[in-house]
Image (cartoon, rainbow, N blue to C red):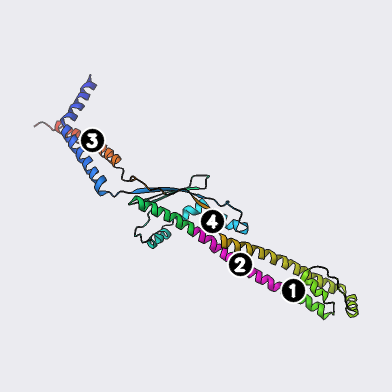
Amino acid sequence: MEETIELRQLIETVLKGKWLIAGLTAITVLITSIFSWFIIPEKFESKATVQVANEVQDTGVMSNYIAAEFTPIVFVQRIKNPSQMNEELKKMGINEEIVKENLKVTNPSNTNLVELSYTARSPKAAQEQLIMLIQKTKDRMDQSVKNTLNELEKTYTSESEHLSAEIETLINQYNEKVRSNGLPEVLIMQSLTASQIITPITDTQMSALSKVDGMLHNELLQIQAQIDSKSAEYRSVLDKYQSVKTGLDSFRPDPFIRQIVEPNLSELPSSPNKMLNIAIALIIGLMISIGIVFFREYWKNSTPAK
């Protein structure tokens, strides 16, 4: 019975303050509506999905350098670099600056996909700026690989020049020993071709050959072996240089970064969520006004009698 009386009292208290509740709630909803429609700027969101794959094609000696650069993690870190991206915006004549809230980047686990969303004051601006961010990130990754390959090309060029000088020095040493010991000139040719050549030799040269001792023979063999070894290194460096040179001239980032979902043009603003704001304002207005009504009733009933 007591519960029925208490419930009746609660209802009566609410009914007594119904106009206060309605008024405060209406004011709260009105203020929120004004802010949502006329004060808080609208923002539009453009979304895209990018695939970053580093095993699209066989690139020989370049594969390690491409695999190190073209990864989802590197793409995410580069596109989230605010200083570089703001610099690109300024080049486009856009005075806005990218903040963390504008650009959202996620890389789902165990995938090579990167999901992007970008908000701006208009649908077109959001789409264009997201396209620009993706393209500039791709360009920077492309330039990073090319810079590495340029350095690699210089390294191979320097190494080949060094090996060439070493081979030339060894050949000169070999030829000097051949000449100083009066040996047949055909041995000079063999040091260059690494093959056996049959050609007539004079009696003098035959006599010189017969006097070659084991020490001289070993010295010639050692120099010849060094020439062969350095020549093999030289050919290997030339192959790597040519591979890098060809790859540098033909390298393009497009196979490694592909847009699975193009940046879209949003039709409706992503924020503020006007209906959600009004719903929240309605609930808050009711809670505050009902609280005031009950406090007013408590204050009235608890006034001490004179």
Q: CA distance from mark 3 to mark 1?
A: 96 Å
Q: Secondary structure at mark 2?
A: helix
User: What label sits on residue 170 in the rendered view?
Assistant: 1
Q: CA distance from mark 3 to mark 4?
A: 56 Å
**Against 87, is 29 above or below?**
above
The stretch drawn in magenta includes residue 144: yes
Part of the protein shown in magenta: 140-167
Q: Quadrant of residue 247?
A: bottom right
User: Main SS type for the magenta part?
Assistant: helix
The stretch drawn in magenta includes residue 180: no
- As shown in the figure, which amino acid type bears the numbered disc 2? Thr
**Against 80, is 229 above or below?**
below
Residue drawn at x 60%, y 62% is 246
First in residue order: circle 4 vs circle 1 = 4
Q: Which residue is mark 4?
A: 69
First in residue order: circle 3 vs circle 2 = 2
- As shown in the figure, which amino acid type bears the numbered disc 1? Leu
- As shown in the figure, which amino acid type bears the numbered disc 3? Leu
- Nearer to us of marks 3 and 1 is 1
Q: Which residue is mark 3?
A: 286
Q: Position of residue 28 (x, y in %)?
A: 22, 41
